[in-house]
Image (cartoon, rainbow, N blue to C red):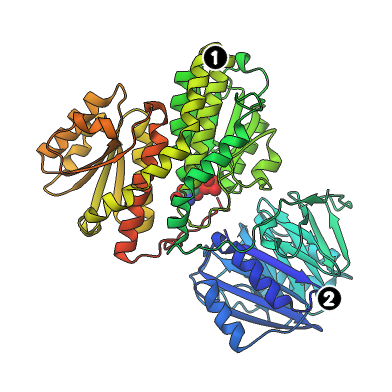
Amino acid sequence: MCGIVGAIGHPDAASVLYQALQRLEYRGYDSAGICIADGGALDARRAVGKLSALGEVLAKDPLPGMTGIGHTRWATHGKATLNNAHPIMAGAEVAVVHNGIIENHKILKAGLIERGHVFTSDTDTEVLTHLFAEAVASQPDLMSATKHVLGQIEGAYAFAVVAKAFPDQIAIARNASPLAVGLGEGANYIGSDAMAMGSMTRRIIFLKDGDYGVISRDDIELRSEDGTPAQREVVMASASPGLVSKDGYQHFMEKEIHEQPEAIAHTLAEITAADGGFNFELGDAAEMKGMVMLAAGTSHNAAMIGKYWMESLADLPVVTEIASEFRYRNPSVRHLDMAMGISQSGESLDTLMALRYAAEQGLKTLGLVNVAESTIARETDLQLLTRAGPEIGVASTKSFTAQLAVLLGLAAELGQKRGVLSADDAAKIHADLASLPRLMGAAMNSFDDIRPFISQLARAQSCLFLGRGMLYPLALEGALKLKELSYIHAEGYASGEMKHGPIALIEEGLPVIALLSNDEHLPKAVSNLMEAKARGAAVMVICTESTKEAVEDIDTIITVPDCDPLIAPILLSIPAQILSYLTAVHKGTDVDQPRNHAKSVTLE
Ligand code: M6R
């Protein structure tokens, strides 16, 4: 994953690089570093752990200068140690920051060692550093040196390089990992995304795969993969918020849970037309044969719920695919005409690659993303935006419920266009969606209702989430949230599947969290949780208000306001999120930056 930044021409490059890294810390927080090229001498500061550790180093030992590069790391090759922290240097000649994986690094390293290079890190990136050290010595200029290096490497990368031999330039390149250049006044910038440069400039050039180039304080020279000059459009990035603050909340996740009524309201405004109907332009909906939804993690759980809606409301066949699996198994797509990529960041490489594969197979692509300038938004044929605002906590919360709101709206629109839903049915769904901000606000009461049960859950080694129908994917999401935040082993199961094996896991006191709403599955879902209770499980029910009458002898029942079962997965998400949040806080884990994790996964 990793975030990379660069600045050239700014009087205090280190300070703007640090600010840019703050905006990229969502990409990884194993270590961070900055290298400044001041009059040709390269000088770096690096620190293991979160960016604040680098901040402390810089406060004691500042780095003056106008040109530099920076990095925040999510470790792949090599542990999170100081030696492996970027910028990776080749002596005092070259420094490199890199996001991605150089796939042929082993063979390159063997050759470099034979030629006398001494390696000081375990990273794949270090081959780039030594290749650049050779190239700047043998090539007439930094552009030729970059081309020379690119001719030797394979893999996914976005990198930036400063070299003592070319003190007034930074070399850049991208392939499969995102990279953007920001145009400033008397200075230029580099970032893994536009947001990184938000406080410096909004004039952005997004590099295309295979692009490389050299930037100086007043010039940007780009080449395409074949070496010809590349003209890339300058776009105005949307106004970037200042560094997002916690606004008095203890954690970003807590704030983002509370922001959901607003996030849904903004998202509904995005998908609602002037006449009050839905605002989607997907071409000839009546003729659509089928859709594949491609996504990862929480976004994949949203896709699974979306499938229920698309099939039941629009009679549209939908397959959901874990993006990282899709393109590697020769999927048959003859029965499909559209691929929808669902991604908060719009940068998950698995999802992006799956969408590219789908496009190669002739499918129309649609991106459902939260970041309007993201790679998926730019590469897909059609876009749907959630307007959840920046999500900083690594655990997805408001982006998930916003994705669900769009998916339900889309299903209703397609249903109407395909003659499955009447205008009245579609209007009812619209009204139900419109009621969500109010209902979600009321569901925040769950914080107080859930608190008394947290100490028991926090002691558990393991936990099960159960759901049927549309609430099965929500059970998967509840389990994912608990795992990633509190490090408690948790699994989500379709309630009816329990008796086909997993019921063997139930022993006295095992926490089982059942998600229920007043839908057609209720009687069977209740029977399934009674089967768990009869075997000693400590059952907690999370349900809509009137549903609680259907369950007996359950001590812990957390309710949200009554709603149409169609929107219940959206509303019931809130107590599921709160449960995980409070458990993590109780256990003292790092809520906003859980271990081994990153907000945006830009590696395969
Ligand atoms: O940005 P994306 O939605 O593409 O990210 C996909 C997953 O990495 C993400 O949903 C992840 O599972 C959640 N942040 C976990 O809470």
Residue 15 visible at all: yes
> Which of 396 and 270 lies nearest the eye of the viewer?
270
Which residue is disc 2 drawn over? Answer: 166
Vertical arrangement, residue 80 with respect to residue 376, above or below: below
Which amino acid type corresponds to the residue marked 2 in the rendered image? Phe
Residue 316 appears in view: no
| Residue 110: percent from left, percent from top | 62, 68
- Determine which quarter of the picture holds residue 5: bottom right
In which quadrant of the rendered view does residue 559 lie? top left
Distance from disc 2 to disc 1, alpha carbons, whole Å, reads: 65 Å
Coordinates of residue 244 in the picture (x, y in percent): 58, 61
For disc 2, the neighbor class at 10 Å (few under 14, some 14 to 19, many from 20) is some
| Numbered label tally | 2
Image position, residue 477 (x, y; %): 38, 43
Residue lying at 66% horizontally and 47% vertically, measured from the top left: 374
Q: What residue is rendered at 43% in x and 32% in y?
A: 305
With 241 as the anchor, is 504 left or right in this view?
left
Residue identifier under label 1: 423
- Residue 481 is situated, as x and y percent measured from the top left of the image, at 38, 50
